[in-house]
Image: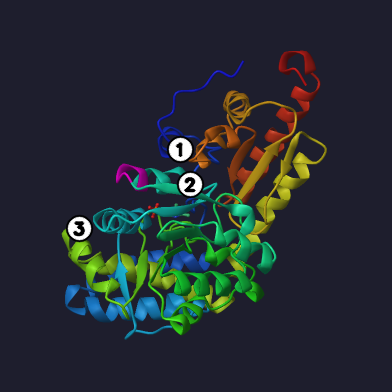
Amino acid sequence: MTKPTAMKNLTVYEIDTLSEIYNLTDGHAFRPWSPAEETIIEGAANLFRQYNRQMQAQIEREYVRDFLTLGKQTIEMEEIGYLMCFTASMAFEIIANYLRMNELSLCLIEPCFDNLADIYKRHDLQMDPFEDAYLDAPVDQFTDYLQGISADVICLVTPNNPTGTVLSEANTRALVQFCKDHNKLLILDNCFRGYMPRDTVFDQYQIVLDAGIDCMMIEDTGKTWPTVEVKAPFFSITKARGLFDSIYDIYTDFLLHISPFGIKLVHEFIKLSMEDEMAYIHDLTRTNRNALYKNLEGTFLTPVEKDFASMVWLRIENGMSGFEVKEMLDEAGIFVLPGDYFYWSDKSLGRNYIRVALSRDPDLFSIAATQIGKVCRQVERMPVLFGG
Ligand SMILES: *Cc1c(COP(=O)(O)O)cnc(C)c1O
């Protein structure tokens, strides 16, 4: 009974809904600016004039320093190389080239945003799924699970998109030790770290440095600060065993340097978040999450997630598929993502999920949340149509 909507990947659906008002598809930060953020934008022309490539190295150094300070991470300019890129996906493309050239197999988190898996697949890498639920499992269970991994490389997203699950500190230590003992390369995508409750953020870099393993970590701004796709992502690569030099060879095929203006603009947004310890962004996320939760109470959509990240992952409890719920919400002018594509090893595992993005104007979001609740309640009164 499922009518699969032809959709090449999640991003195509996100592009198709860009013009919509109640667009809750992509996880990019798109919301009105606070007065303090407006002031930064007013000063943008000055940043554009003031900073040029002669200052590039210093601009990057100062930016990375503040970014990682806000993220509560050790900064180690000698032992780690930081490579800036225009999008986080570009870092993955570079990494995927390295893995293919070295014939490395991969264990990749699942569920996971589909473009990560698709980038790796395009390079024909052999891939096994790493189950999201283990990220924060008790450390003995986690360690047992690791014993089953034969791949050369482990790639995790933490907090994960779409579930918000975090690789716990104890499990990070266990994983790093496992990588050391078995000579594995570790890749951590930290694109959503900014949303973690401040008292739960811990120093991943120090754990990696202490062990001396090969590791790459992807850092991003696009999901957190609303800078209209002016972004300043980078990826961090350990230098101890020569990994950095190999990656740098590939990196320089792709770019000379990213925009110093872009870095400075994003840097200003990050300084604001340093002042308020992320409070503005966390408050807005909480407001929108609460609005959605409240409207979904007693409906067939149940949050199954850690409740801090900028998206809500919902399980559909009445047997409808994510596509069916998505199409029903499309009709009501509210746009969300179906869950299938997040399960890259077997789409059917994601059949009964949808994802709702939260980084939006709270006034608009509140209307959308009300509408979603209303549509769900209407469906519940039409059990024949949807077969309970
Ligand atoms: C969005 C996303 C990316 C890619 O970010 P872009 O800068 O848009 O390429 C990478 N990793 C995760 C987990 C993401 O959600």
User: Marks 1 and 2, Cα distance to the nearest angstrom?
Assistant: 8 Å
Secondary structure of residue under mark 1: helix
Q: Residue at 39%, 72% (x, y): give it.
A: 267
Range shown magenta: 120-124
Q: Mark 3 points at which residue?
A: 254
What label sits on residue 291 in the rendered view?
none
Residue 116, percent from left and from top: 41, 49
Judge: label 3 CB < 8 Å from ligand 1. no
Q: Is 359 in the magenta?
A: no
Amino acid at circle 2? Phe
Q: Residue at 69%, 39% (x, y): give it.
A: 315
Residue 73 vs 1, above or below: the answer is: below
Q: In this rendering, does residue 357 appear at all?
A: yes
- Image side of residue 199 versus residue 49, left or right: right
Residues at badges 1 and 2 in contact (C-beta under 8 Å)?
yes
Q: Mark 1 points at which residue?
A: 10
User: Marks 3 and 2, Cα distance to the nearest angstrom?
Assistant: 23 Å
Secondary structure of residue under mark 3: helix
Residues at badges 1 and 3 in contact (C-beta under 8 Å)?
no
Near mark 3 (Cα within 10 A), the count class, few <14, some 14-19 or many ≥20, is few
Judge: label 2 CB < 8 Å from ligand 1. yes
Q: Residue at 45%, 34% (x, y): give it.
A: 13
Q: Name the residue under label 2.
A: 113
